Every structure is written in structure tokens, then in C-alpha cells.
Image (cartoon, rainbow, N blue to C red):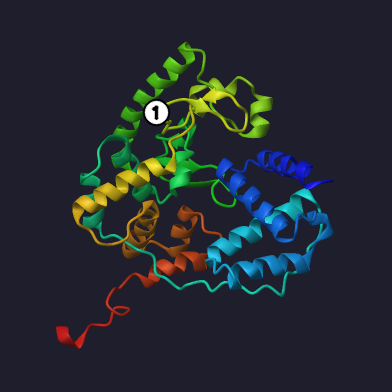
């Protein structure tokens, strides 16, 4: 098997496992870099030594961040585990990039409100969802009509990080804005259907099992893109969800207008959601479930943001 045949096989398996297009592109890029680093040798000819050498090179010579090195590791592990079915050992000899110990940036309630006041329409609704539910930006963009349960006041996050489903809260304040927004989205969908389109992307197996489901209202994205585009995977013209950069631009502009000097991204609202729940006394295990953290230690980082001023210690200047 040569490397040219290998890449299409990787893509097919990733799509069968419902990996996002962004993840697919990223993994393919890392696998290519791994192969080129070793002078285009086929991965079947390589193993633990070559993998460790490549990952160590990223840390020592390229000075990549720990998250970047871990991304490369995930791509290579996927290649060997799911595509080549080859054991690569324990990878003990990797020089790991140092992971910086940083506290998450958290906004106060007042700061969140000031940012929301600078936003209008769809961006305001999306940021309200990020802060009100704690979901990630990509999870928000992937939301479909059927994932909103107004009756039980909850949102179902499907295929979240780690490809796991979970349930989070739907704030009462978002009921009417969301219903109003969905009316306008439905008009877009009906126009697409009238023009001979209206089929949305579905997970690989579902698209084959239920070929007509793609046009059903429940499967449509809650935040569709403004224009239809050609799907890079299938070559079909369809309406995808909004691109992540759209909301990022609106957030950046709103933060500048408020004069807030904190580095605010879409993820900051997730950090704020978790911290504010803990401030209100909610159990950390509950917050862990809402956020979809596998390990409670990940959720614990938000406890370090509480009791500001040196872990709640009162400065002698304030005596």
C-alpha cells in the first residue's frame, strides 16, 4: 500500500466515525508531516521510535505548544489504531512540550451583560447560548432544530468533544428569542426546498439509512450560513452552518466597544458559565456533567478563579 492510497482510506474511516471536516483536515495534515519528516516512508514501516522522534522534534526544534503536540499525537494514534490496526507501544521516549499553567479568563456578570448589549440579532443569541448553557462554539454551530427541547428546558449536545452526547440547560430567557429565530430559519429552509435544495449534511450512516431525512426540518442547523456552498466532501451544493470566524469577529468588535481589556474569545463565556455556577454554590460534579468534562480535575480549574484576591485572603491594605 502506498501513501497515495492511504490518505483516501484515512478520510473514509474518519467520515464513517463522524469526525468533523475541520478535524479531518487537521489529522491529514499532521499525518502528511509525519510521513514527510521520515522521507516519505510508509507508516507501516515505522513504529514507536519514529513516532517518538517526530513528536519530540515538534517540541525541541519547532517549539510547538503542548496542545499542538498533543494534536499531532492524536492524529498519529488515530492512523495506527483505526486505519493500520498496528500497535505502537507506550511511546515512553517522547520529549513533551511544557504545558503552561494558566488560569481561565472569566468575565463578571456585569462584563457579560455589557458585551451582550453591544451585540444584535444572531450574534447576540449565539453568545447568550454560549454563556447560558456552557457549550463550546463548535457545539453551538452544530446544533440542529431537534436538539432544542423547549418542554424540558434542555439542549442536547450531540457528538461533543470525545464524540459523546450530553444534556445541558436551556435558559428560560432564551425560549422566546430562540423560537423567534427558528421561524426565520424555517423560512430559509422552505425557500431552499422550493429552489430544489434544502438537504443538510447528515452523519455518514444516517445519510445512507434515511436518505430523505436530510430535508426534514428537525435536522436543519439552528445557525445556518447566509449562502449555500459546495460541500468539499461530497461536492453537493447545500447550506452548512455558520463558520466559527463569523461570531469571533462580532465578539472581538463588541469587546473593543466596551473597553474591556481581558482577552475574550467565544470560550471565555464557557469559562464564565462554569465559574458563575460554582459561585452560586452548585455542586462541582453537576457543573462537570453540564460541561461534558471527562475528568473532574478539568472542572476543578474553575475553583481557582473563585474567591479572588489570593484565594480569599484579605489584603492588609484593606484592614
The answer to whether residue 77 is visible is no
Q: Residue at x 30, y 33 (%)?
A: 176
Q: Residue furthest front?
A: 39
Label 1 neighbourhood size at 10 Å, few (<14), some (14-19), many (20+)? few
Quarter of the image that includes the C terminus: bottom left
Q: Considering the numbered disc 1 on the image, is that residue within a helix, a strand or a loop? A: loop
Q: Position of residue 54 (x, y in %)?
A: 68, 65
Q: Where does residue 207 sit, x and y in percent of width and height?
A: 64, 27
Q: Is residue 223 left or right of residue 125?
A: right
Q: Is residue 131 left or right of residue 141?
A: left
Q: Nearer the viewer, residue 55 or 89?
A: 55
Residue denoted by label 1: 226
Residue 289's place in the image compared with 64, above or below, is above
What residue is shown at x 23% (from left), y 82% (from top)? 314
Residue closest to the eye, 151 or 31: 31
Location of residue 22 in the rendering, given as x and y in whole percent from the top left corner: 55, 44
Q: Is residue 228 above or below residue 273?
A: above
Amino acid at each position: 500500500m502506498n501513501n497515495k492510497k492511504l490518505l483516501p482510506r484515512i478520510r473514509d474511516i474518519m467520515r464513517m466515525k463522524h469526525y468533523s471536516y475541520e478535524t479531518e483536515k487537521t489529522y491529514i495534515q499532521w499525518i502528511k508531516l509525519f510521513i514527510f519528516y521520515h522521507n516519505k516512508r510508509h507508516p507501516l514501516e515505522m513504529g514507536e521510535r519514529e513516532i517518538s522522534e517526530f513528536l519530540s522534534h515538534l517540541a525541541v526544534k519547532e517549539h510547538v505548544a503542548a496542545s499542538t503536540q498533543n494534536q499531532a499525537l492524536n492524529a498519529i494514534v488515530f492512523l495506527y489504531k483505526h486505519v493500520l490496526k498496528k500497535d505502537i507501544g507506550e511511546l515512553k521516549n517522547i520529549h513533551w512540550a511544557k504545558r503552561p499553567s494558566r488560569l481561565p479568563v472569566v468575565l463578571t456578570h456585569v462584563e457579560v451583560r455589557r458585551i451582550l448589549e453591544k451585540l444584535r440579532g444572531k450574534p447576540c443569541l449565539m453568545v447568550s447560548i454560549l454563556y447560558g448553557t456552557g457549550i463550546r462554539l463548535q457545539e453551538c454551530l452544530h446544533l440542529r432544530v431537534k436538539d432544542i427541547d423547549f418542554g424540558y428546558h434542555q439542549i442536547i449536545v450531540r457528538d461533543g468533544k470525545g464524540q459523546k452526547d450530553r444534556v445541558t440547560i436551556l435558559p428560560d430567557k432564551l425560549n422566546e428569542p430562540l423560537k423567534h429565530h427558528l421561524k426565520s430559519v424555517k423560512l430559509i429552509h422552505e425557500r431552499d426546498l422550493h429552489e430544489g435544495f434544502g438537504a443538510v449534511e447528515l452523519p455518514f450512516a444516517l445519510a445512507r439509512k434515511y436518505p430523505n431525512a436530510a430535508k426534514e426540518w428537525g435536522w436543519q442547523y439552528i445557525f445556518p450560513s447566509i449562502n449555500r456552498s459546495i460541500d468539499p466532501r461530497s461536492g453537493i451544493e447545500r447550506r452548512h452552518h455558520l463558520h466559527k470566524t463569523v461570531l469571533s469577529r462580532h465578539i472581538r468588535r463588541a469587546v473593543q466597544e466596551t473597553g474591556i481589556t481581558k482577552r475574550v474569545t467565544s470560550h471565555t463565556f464557557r469559562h464564565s458559565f462554569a465559574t458563575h455556577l460554582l459561585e452560586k454554590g452548585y455542586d462541582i460534579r453537576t457543573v462537570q456533567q453540564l460541561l461534558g468534562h471527562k475528568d473532574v480535575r478539568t472542572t476543578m480549574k474553575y475553583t481557582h478563579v473563585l474567591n479572588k484576591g489570593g484565594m480569599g485572603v484579605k489584603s492588609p491594605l484593606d484592614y
